[in-house]
Amino acid sequence: YAYGFFRELRTAEIPDREAIPIAFRAASDLGPGLRVTLLPEASSQLVIGLNPAIRPAGEDDAKLDEFHRPFMLVRREAKESPSNFVSVVEPYEGAPFLDSVERIDLPDGAIAVRVVIGERTDVIVMGAKTAVTIPTGQQVATFQGDYGVLSLLGEEIEHAFSVGEGGWSRGGYHLASSGPRSVPLQAAEAGTLVLATTSLPAPEKGDIVRVITSDGWTYPYTLAGAETRGEELWLQVSEGPGFQYDAKTQRLQFASFPQRKHSGTVRVEWNPSSSRP
């Protein structure tokens, strides 16, 4: 097992609410860099050590003991609730530009991060199944949904974005968003998913649509375009879709490896988003 290749392990307890910035630069210290800020939960451990470097080994597993590279990870033993590992990835040209990154504690498994860049503050929330309240300057914001971003310039809202049932509220500002759309798949043509027409708004170019099988598999595709043809809604997808589907027998089979097969109803889902200044 891969953990058997770890070497020179060292661990340390991470203080509660302690953000850990890690900078990656080329050995020459020239060119762009990358800073990753880890935002661990309480009772987390920081682990550093060496692990195999597969590229210097020439992709040869027999040489993995000869080539190593440093690594760092955050470990947490989940007890009453699952662990949520959160980090902010910040690529930069000359120097890091984020002034501060902070994790905000929320109930019921929701995750929130506050990022400050000069006069601008971005509040990012994920997985808020029920409404959560978040301090935002002199006012409190409320959010519910799968994913949301609230951007403030000083005390003024510059932009807001929301996906999932709910939306944002702050003072007199309100942005509503709806839950996922779900329509049965009728056929799969070359590069196209065919659905029955629906009164629901069609997804927009660039949206991610998900093909979901009755046994729980999910296959995401990027929407290239949507077109209504008679009583059918045709969704052109960029990636394929790479499978055949017979609606009468309810059988789906992929043409390429691993040529997975599914039986039962297949649905296509997408999440409409809402955004505005």
Image (spheres, rainbow, N blue to C red):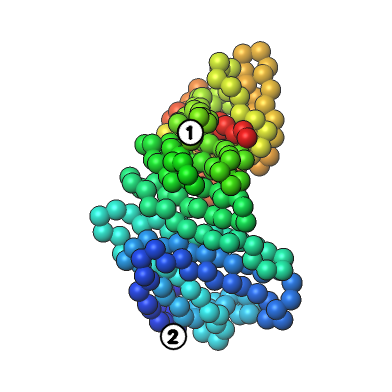
- Seen in the picture, residue 205 relative to 70 is either above or below; the reply is above
Of mark 1 and mark 2, the one earlier in the sequence is 2
Which residue occupies the foreground of this view, 134 or 39? 134
Which disc number belongs to residue 171?
A: 1
- Seen in the picture, residue 200 relative to 104 is either above or below; the reply is above
Q: Position of residue 87 (x, y in %)?
A: 50, 60
* Disc 2: which residue: 8
Which residue occupies the foreground of this view, 82 or 166? 166
Which residue occupies the foreground of this view, 196 or 246? 196
Q: Quadrant of residue 31?
A: bottom right
- Disc 1 residue crowd, few under 14, some 14–19, many 20+, Cα 10 Å: few
Amino acid type at image mark 1: Gly
- Seen in the picture, residue 228 relative to 250 is either above or below; the reply is above
> From this viewpoint, is residue 177 visible?
no
Q: Position of residue 176 (x, y in %)?
A: 51, 28
Asked which secondary structure carries label 1, the reply is: loop
Amino acid type at image mark 2: Glu
Q: Residue at x 37, y 61 (%)?
A: 41
